[in-house]
Amino acid sequence: MNYHEYTVLVSTDPTYYGGECTPQDAVRIAHALYYLIRDEFPGVSVRTGSEIGGRGVTGPDDATVREIEVWISENWTTAL
């Protein structure tokens, strides 16, 4: 499947990752997540930034959005 119609927003805000996270750590984690997500979901658009808010995954099919959200929630710690 090609996920080109889906977008994932990944924050570089250190507060998103916890009180011990530095700004440099947050950027490193966000970039690692970027590549993990792109590898798992070919064609998906991944955007990173400190001003990112709102829904983390968007796309035309709610079931696929949920699949991506679940995968991220189960695998994001790999980026640490």
Image (spheres, grey):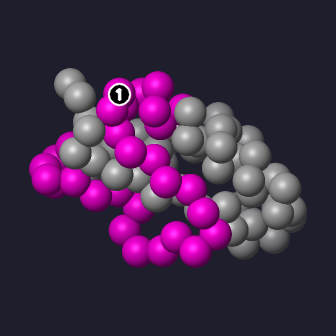
> Residue shown at 14%/53% (left/top)?
60
Where's residue 65, x and y in %?
25, 50
Where's residue 39, x and y in %?
47, 26
Where's residue 70, x and y in %?
37, 46
Q: Residue furthest left?
A: 61
Secondary structure under the numbered disc 1 in the rendered image: loop
Visible residue check, residue 69: no
Q: In the picture, residue 21 is in which quadrant? A: bottom right
Find out whether residue 16 is within the magenta segment: no
> Residue shown at 26%/36% (left/top)?
3
Visible residue check, residue 52: yes
Magenta-drawn segment: 36-64
Q: Is 38 located above or below residue 57 in the figure?
A: above
Q: Is 42 located above or below residue 15 in the figure?
A: above
Residue at which label 1 appears: 42
Find out whether residue 45 is within the magenta segment: yes
Q: Is residue 24 left or right of residue 62?
A: right
> Residue shown at 73%/42% (left/top)?
80
> Residue shown at 81%/70% (left/top)?
19
Name the kind of residue labelled 1 in the image.
Pro
Q: Is residue 16 left or right of residue 5?
A: right
Q: In the picture, residue 43 is in which quadrant? A: top left
Q: Is 36 located above or below residue 15 in the figure?
A: above
Q: Residues within 10 Å of mark 1 (few under 14, many from 20)?
A: few
Q: Is residue 25 left or right of residue 64?
A: right
